[in-house]
Image: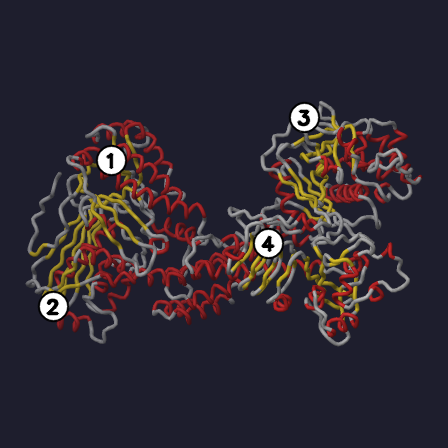
Amino acid sequence: MDRHSERILERDHTENWIIPSISAHKLEIRKRRGVLPPESILLTVEDPQAHVGSGGATLNALLVAAEHLSAKAGYTVCDSRRIRLVSLYLRQGRDFLFDACGRGFTVLPVEDPHAPVECVTCNLDSLLATLRYQLCPASPPGVWICSTDMVLMLPSNPVLNWAEFRGARVISVPGTLEYAMKHGVYLADERGLVRDIVYCGSEQRIQTCVLEDGRVPLVTLRRLFDAFTPSRLLKISVSSVLYPPLPAVPRLYTPDLLCVCRVSIRQTFCVCSFLHGAPDTPQLPDRIQGARAVLWKELHDLPLSMVYIPDGRYEYLTTDAGCLLTWPFCCVLIQHPQLIVDGSSVVNSYLDGEVQVSPGSVIQNCHLMGPLRVGRGCLLADIDQAGALVLRGHELSDVILQAHPVQIQNLPLMVYTMLGTKDQLQDTAGSATYVNLPWDEFFHRTGICANDLWGLETPSHKRSLLTTPLFPVLHPTESLGAADVLWFLGSTDGDHLKRWRSSWRMSWQQLRQHLDRERTLEMRRKVFFSQKREKLQKALLAREEGSLLPAIRCAVQEGSQELLLTTLDHVASVAEDPGVAARALACIADILGVMAGGEGGLRSGPAANKAWASVYQLLEKGCIAEGVRQLAAERGKWLSRPALLIRAARHYEGAEQILIRRAVMSSSQFVSIGQRELPALEHWVSAECPARIDMSGGWSDTPPITYEHGGAVVNVAVLVDGQRPIGARARRIPTAEIHVCSDSGPRGAQLHTELRVASLEDLQDYCQPQAPGALLKAAFICSGTVSMTSHKSLQGQLMEAYGGGFELHTWSHLPHGSGLGTSSILAGAALAVLYEASGRSADTESLIHAVLYLEQVLTTGGGWQDQVGGLIPGVKIGRSSPQLPLRVRVQEIELPDAFLQTLSRHLLLVYTGKTRLARNLLQDVLRNWYGRLPAIVQNADALVHNAELCAQAFGTGNLSRLGDCLNQYWLQKKCMAPGCEPLAVRRIMDTLEPYVHGQSLAGAGGGGFLYLLTKEPDQKEALQQLLEKTQGLGRCSVHSVQVSTQQFTVCRGERSHTEDHV
């Protein structure tokens, strides 16, 4: 019995769909990918009997769908009105010579780099996309009837007019007369109404169908019935007194359901076959005439219209290999891409080693190994590694070599077939060729004789390739493989002939009955994920920028996540630098997150379960390989439900952060410490710093972006309201202990913290950012003033090295979360005064890198631009290269004469009253960066580019261009961290927009200070009044800004608090 699978898509007013399918599992995967709506219902519908036509199969599928929808709606009998909701019926069609899974699952050389899920595209995917996004969106309720026998391509998005649509409508694309003579063509009038359908007509007949553009409208097997016509079809299906019932009538084709287009009389339609309109067409059998008469009576009054899409085209998938030999390559891993010549096609394949592919050849679903030369005109399909080993060293041309998984009773086998690209399966022995040779030449080449193939009883007119038992299936004592057909190309080895004659063999026709389609699909899946595994490993180790999330989503959807997890474990273990290992762990976190399926809670959250603590300790010590191994072992305990998967993902992100910190700590080699005389006891050393305004490029300085992509940031050191708002001072004290004191916040509303550290235990929480005095404790440790690993006590270390302890005071007069770089600049000032107070010195470059190191120890992360902005005066651009160790180089920008004063008169700060939460933003940014989302990668490029443009604008003194850079920078910040613009801030910016060249929130965004470049100078008072008069913005405060030009210095003795002004 022929088995045809039908698909129906139901769509009601809420875009629900229903599909009957050849492989429910494969379409379930497509639902998860988003190719099909999540509400889709999958059904499998068999033809009612063998050799039923496409029309009967269509009616049968509609009937089954109507029964299903009726039951779903609560009916106990079939209600034909329910089928008005159905919008798509797909027919799998006939077997396809070049694909065991049929035309629907024939792979196509189509790859969407922006698709959320990376996968092989087959004809079914292409058809669904064309229907869903190009043909169906504006169509009224009804039934689309489609076939997968062809590939339809619509380069444009056609605008279809559905006004007053009634009856049926067909989609047509242009073709040549020569092509149309082998296919179908519509004859339409000037109103677009179809008057006839001509199949395989004569040139004279087809000439009557030519349109104004000189081409003919081809039949594309894409048709739409309105919402009421299917009900009429079903009505006659279930009420007909015909036997067999209408859906089971043989030779009833889908075009017969379009009898509405016939202008001929009833007798012509009912008696003659619709597919052959010639005068000598034989009459149809009585029962078929009766079925067609029923159709005529019910449908002949309905109009059939045609939509002609002039820039569309289709490729009918025939038994001619030429339809596959012109496609490009995609979804592949090629170790030597230079060997793949233009004009060839490689789809879903892994080419390992030197595999050369010539123009006009196709390789699909193969794992091949070099050396191998695939010459012109070849098709290689479904060849696995075992077959590839046999192929090594061969040179092929003009042949079709396929591997076919078959199931004979309970025995799984692999059968290889070979054809020449010029062979015709239907040709009989007199005119036929095999492997492009006449039979006599083939017999002479191989030693095979005609009796081996057909015997004496088979007449010559029945000796076609389709029925010739050429292909070895099973041998009594030996295993068979590709070698058992490759010898057809020229071997006279008697052993090959003997094995061939001793084997049980099958013809093409026989093989088709035993094809194991599920095993074939599984083989293709393995090929796909084997090359995905290699590409993923290569992308990580070679530090490539492509997103791995589409492949991760695909692996999870198809149940192959363990393959990728194992690969990522390996990459993290063998990576030469911790940055690569960190990205591998981030990918594992992504896999776990995708496995959770949107359940289990938020990805961002605590990662402090004790079960992972020992693993974290290993990573902190630099034991990465062992740490990764133990991570994998622990991971296996957290896979049973979404909540555990999310928690495991959080802990992998925690491990990733440890490795990022280790990568950034490589910057410590650029910290150079000199020796100086200890200052006297009780004598203060102090440093005061300006704040910084980031003018462009921020986020590109953030690890891992800064060492994976490279960064560039332009910022300005500024006084706020005439003051340096950040500072630190330190002194030695006689007692062997440490006193720390910090004041933070605007004057009059400062938060005061004071601590006494008497032992190393009091310093243990230095790496917990929320602990009191954590930053200052970390400064003592990172500066080397105190060692946590020393066997000596704190008092012993202090007395031996310094003859006493230390007192350290820090202050910031800026509000918490200001966005002006406070914490990093404060860390730089604290380190500088500690070095000085302990008899050491560090230049500015050393301090910049020392702060990087400190912030990793403190576990706050962060980039390098803040300390660059506060420790180096004026306007400058900092840059980092995409490499480890991380090194920051700074270039001060020379401004035109008088532009410094101009800038200070046009630059203002507005405090928004919103507190910025940089750490919350940072987690999302890093996750998106590690996912290499295309928008994020492009935005990183744009940030660096805009920083260079901003530096040029400063160099030329162009305020307008500088404002453009600020506005562009704010857009880039919002792209990098969506959600960083609160509604209240948007209101402020909208209010100020008419008065400024450009504006942006400082730092990462989310709150804090907004900085403006005003069109007119000296606008502080005017803008303050404007904000006070605007409802809801009266609490905003405007602050003056002056560019700080004084070099950063550490002063011994009490410093007089003089300020520099421009």
Whether pointer 4 and pointer 3 mark residues with C-beta atoms closer than 8 Å, the reply is no
Q: Secondary structure at mark 3?
A: loop
Residue that badge 1 annotates: 1037
N-terminal of the two: label 3 or label 2? 3
Identify the residue at image location x=20%, y=66%.
784
N-terminal of the two: label 1 or label 2? 2
Type of amino acid under label 3 = Glu
Q: Is residue 154 above or below residue 829?
A: above
- Which image quadrant for residue 761? bottom left
* Front label number (4 vs 3): 3
Residue that badge 4 annotates: 347
Q: Nearer the viewer, residue 179 or 1008?
A: 179
N-terminal of the two: label 4 or label 3? 3
Residue that badge 3 annotates: 212
Identify the residue at image location x=32%, y=30%.
993
Type of amino acid under label 1 = Ser
